Image (cartoon, rainbow, N blue to C red):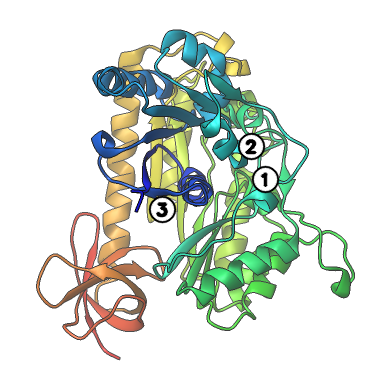
Amino acid sequence: MTEPKKLFIKTYGCQMNVYDSERMVEAMGAEGYVTTEVAEDADMVLLNTCHIREKASEKLYSDLGRLKPLKAARPDLKIGVAGCVAQAEGAEIQRRMPLVDIVVGPQAYHRLPQLARGTGPQVDTDFPEEDKFDLLPARKARRGPTAFLTVQEGCDKFCAFCVVPYTRGAEVSRPVDRIMTEARDLISRGVREITLLGQNVNAYHGHGPADQGGGDWTLARLIRALAKVDGLDRIRYTTSHPNDMDDDLIAAHGDVPQLMPYLHLPVQSGSDRILKAMNRKHTRDDYFRLVDRIRAARPDILLSSDFIVGFPGETDSDFHDTMDLVRHVTYGAAFSFKYSARPGTPAAEKPDVEAEVADARLQELQALITSQQRAAQLAMVGREVGVLYEKAGRQPGQMVGKSDHLHAVHVDDPDGKVGELVRVRVSGSATNSLSAVRIS
């Protein structure tokens, strides 16, 4: 019996890349590949890259450098680069690193098997007319209790710091019936919680089923339809833009029980001047009013956000406005970064803030965010929450899962099983997690 070929895949960056990696694994599985956790054992190594964060390209080339001895020892080893860095740099990756056999963008990975069968350097960074999801193989493997499901890709916002419109393309929403089919399939294989993904997910406008009148559905309408599917107990979505939080989506947070009380709502800056320079097309007061409406609909909702400090032209006054916004809103979590230029974006043409100044601002912001996160976790102590068990904990008799508010929770439950959705009472708060005991 012939041994199956082995695929090693490394995923960088966002949840959408995690989803894309799963689909690439399935595509190569149809070609007879099985996954391995050890690159040295692989017949194909695939690096699924992200171009959003700092030094993404440098990290890729560093990882490729570490693969040189492996490729030298095994010339038949296929090495591929996928994702947003692949899209942005294309054949330049192979020019700099001739060991790379395949470069494939995020809209073309359904053609990965064809590229893998080819000889010589292969590059595919097209934005094809066909829907890649229609050409991927059916999902067959048993799943854990949580899953990502991409419903929207690309972005039309053109924020001055962001490469997504250039690497992922214009906003495209998947048709409702295909999303519903994939969701039902995931549920049939053990999934109880689905996170809907999109670069700008709340701009979703997928075409509805013919038997329900067709037309474009909003994200809120899609969520309401998913909530009626037996076996789907939890729904989340990420990531969203403040300008696309419409009335129906806000209302859904209050009247769809399956929609969890957690919302990632990036604002990036608290300064109107910087928001304008970023091309965000909203003000700090717009954001405040939106937060008030969301909390009125779902008072217990936990908010998280993204922040960039040191954006070109940011003054001390601009940064103080950001700190003021964070204090005003109060977050349960947030992601903060020092600005780094992305080639081809409008902001890349502007002079940087001094590195020492940006570093100091980032440390100050992160200290405030950390204090708010700890306060939010401490406020959970003594409360009853739902937890979906995802795996056994490190301690005997312990299960680990996520709460309704997306906190990691360690539960004392010797009889607990992966996939159970249970009620617990929170008993303690650690640095990045909660402890709890099962009460039902």
Q: Give how far across and how far down residue 198 sits, in percent.
A: 60, 48
Query: Which of the numbered marks, if any, corresponds to residue 331?
Result: 3
Q: Is residue 271 visible?
A: no
The answer to whether the residues at label 1 and label 2 have Cβ atoms under 8 Å apart is yes
- Judged left or right of residue 192, residue 111 is right
Determine whether, in the image, residue 194 is placed left or right of residue 393.
right
Please tell me in which quadrant of the rendered image residue 45 appears: top left
Badge 3 density bin: few <14, some 14–19, many ≥20, Cα 10 Å: many
Distance (Cα) linking label 3 and label 1:
37 Å
What secondary structure is marked by label 1? Answer: helix
Q: Residue at x 45, y 52 (%)?
A: 304
Given the image, on which type of amino acid does mark 3 rest? Answer: Tyr
* Spatial CA span between label 1 and label 2: 7 Å
Inspect the image, locate mark 2, and give the three-letter code of the amino acid beneath it: Gln
Task: Work out whether residue 200 or residue 78 is closer to the camera in this orientation and state it.
Answer: 78
In the rendered structure, the answer to whether residue 198 lies left or right of residue 7 reads right
Q: Quadrant of the N terminus?
A: bottom left
Specify which label sits upstream in the sequence, 2 or 3.
2
Q: Position of residue 247 (x, y in %)?
A: 72, 63
Classify 325 as above or below 60: below
Q: Say the numbered circle drawn on residue 109.
A: none
Under circle 2, the secondary element is: loop
User: Residue 324's image quarter?
Assistant: top left
